[in-house]
Amino acid sequence: MEHSPLSLAQSLLRCPSVTPEEGGALSFIESVLKQAGFEVHRPVFSEPGTPDVENLYARYGTGEPYLLFAGHTDVVPPGDVGRWTHDPFGGEIHDGELYGRGAVDMKGGIACMMAAALDFIRDNPDFKGSIGFLITGDEEGPAVNGTVKLLEWAKGRGERFDHCILGEPTNPNQLGDMIKIGRRGSLTGSIVVEGKQGHVAYPHLADNPIPGMMRLLDGLLKEPLDRGTDHFDASNLEVTTIDVGNPASNVIPAEAKATFNIRFNDLWTPRSLEAEIERRLREAAGNTVRYTLTMEPTNAVAFLTPPNAFVDFIADAIKAETGSVPKLSTTGGTSDARFIVKYCPVVEFGLVGQTMHQIDERVPVADLDRLATIYRKVLDAYFSA
Ligand SMILES: [Zn+2]
């Protein structure tokens, strides 16, 4: 490959693009893609109360089908730089591993996508179809001025994608372990039970909110929300905190608060889940517990890209390169795929996630070459289908 995934990754790692700084990373991608014949745009998005963020959109070709690569060049801060074995923004290689913040999450992934696309275009300059890059600088931050707005902006220009690969690090242990074909949704709520403060020796003059809170939480937890689906684990409700804040052992507190988070599968929408929570609390409270429920707004809905020919292209390419049959998974936290899926089917496959966000984030150079080869095989299969 003319642009090796390693050299591209090193150049990207040397750009200090901690959210929301562009750090030169998008400019580097712009110059490389332009040279290869891509039309490149650099929209900047703003929103009161959040930093302005630079983004990149690039397209080669005008035909269909249109395969989009998506990702982010922003990275989380390096933490204590003194604890890194190698400069987090140096792009240094040691013992066959490339060190740097973003090595796996996800400048390494972007480098592999670029190397594969450039290689494919050089071999097939007149292929029937289009290849695009949708790269944000706002994934690790508030995620307000990034992928959501970039997708809207592209739609406004009349862009229409057929499929998307998001290059987040999806493999738990080894390259080829896992493709993500969906993600769970996330919903957070909090409950406040009102009581009346008083002396513990005179409970008839007070109203302790703690037993009421216990009843409510028991009502939420005693039955599972569901038993999972073909591609999803069972939805899970975790109580994340219970707060009374009472320092005295002789005082009945006035109020108890609890917060919970639900990671839910495709049997639920945030609205249907909220209705179920309300139903359970009403039932548990009866006429005796006075409480208020507050649900936080969420944009993290559950989604699934059902296994299909597109997923097969990726799984087959992985098998050909690594010998592994990847697990089709919907586990883990949320990702920008939840925004992309509103525009086209999206599948996530990238590097091994083990060192992401850690001190000494690093990637085996061999993994970069193999991932680029996998993406290249996907392009071959996709555009010859
Ligand atoms: Zn990431």
Image (cartoon, rainbow, N blue to C red):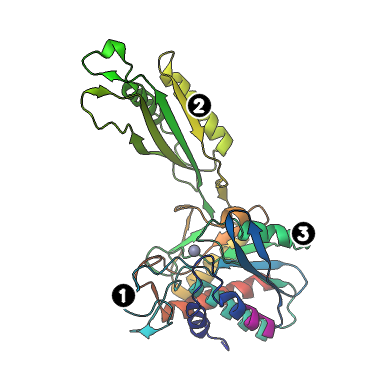
Q: What's drawn in magenta, residue-wise?
A: 30-36
Q: Where's residue 76, x and y in %?
A: 45, 65
Q: Which of marks 3 and 2 is nearer the N terminus?
A: 3
Against 65, residue 328 (above or below) is above
Q: Where's residue 181, x and y in %?
A: 54, 56
Q: Is mark 2 on a helix, strand or loop?
A: helix
Contact between labelled residues 1 and 2, with CB atoms less than 8 Å apart: no
Q: What residue type is labelled 1?
A: Gly
Residue at horizontal 33 percent and vertical 84 percent from the top: 95
| Quarter of the rendering occupied by the C terminus | bottom right
Q: Which amino acid does label 2 sit on?
A: Glu
Q: Where's residue 122, x and y in %?
A: 66, 86
For disc 3, the marked residue is 156
Q: Where's residue 170, x and y in %?
A: 46, 63
Q: Is mark 1 on a helix, strand or loop?
A: helix
Q: How far apart are marks 3 and 2 (CA)?
A: 39 Å
Give residue 278's mark: 2
Give residue 82's mark: 1
Around disc 3, counting alpha carbons within 10 Å, would you say few (fewer than 14), some (14 to 19), or many (20 or more)?
few
Q: How far apart are marks 2 and 1 (CA)?
A: 50 Å
Around disc 2, counting alpha carbons within 10 Å, would you say few (fewer than 14), some (14 to 19), or many (20 or more)?
some
Along the horizontal axis of the image, is 92 left or right of 320? left
Q: Mark 2, mark 1: which one is toward the viewer?
A: 1
Against 324, residue 269 (above or below) is above
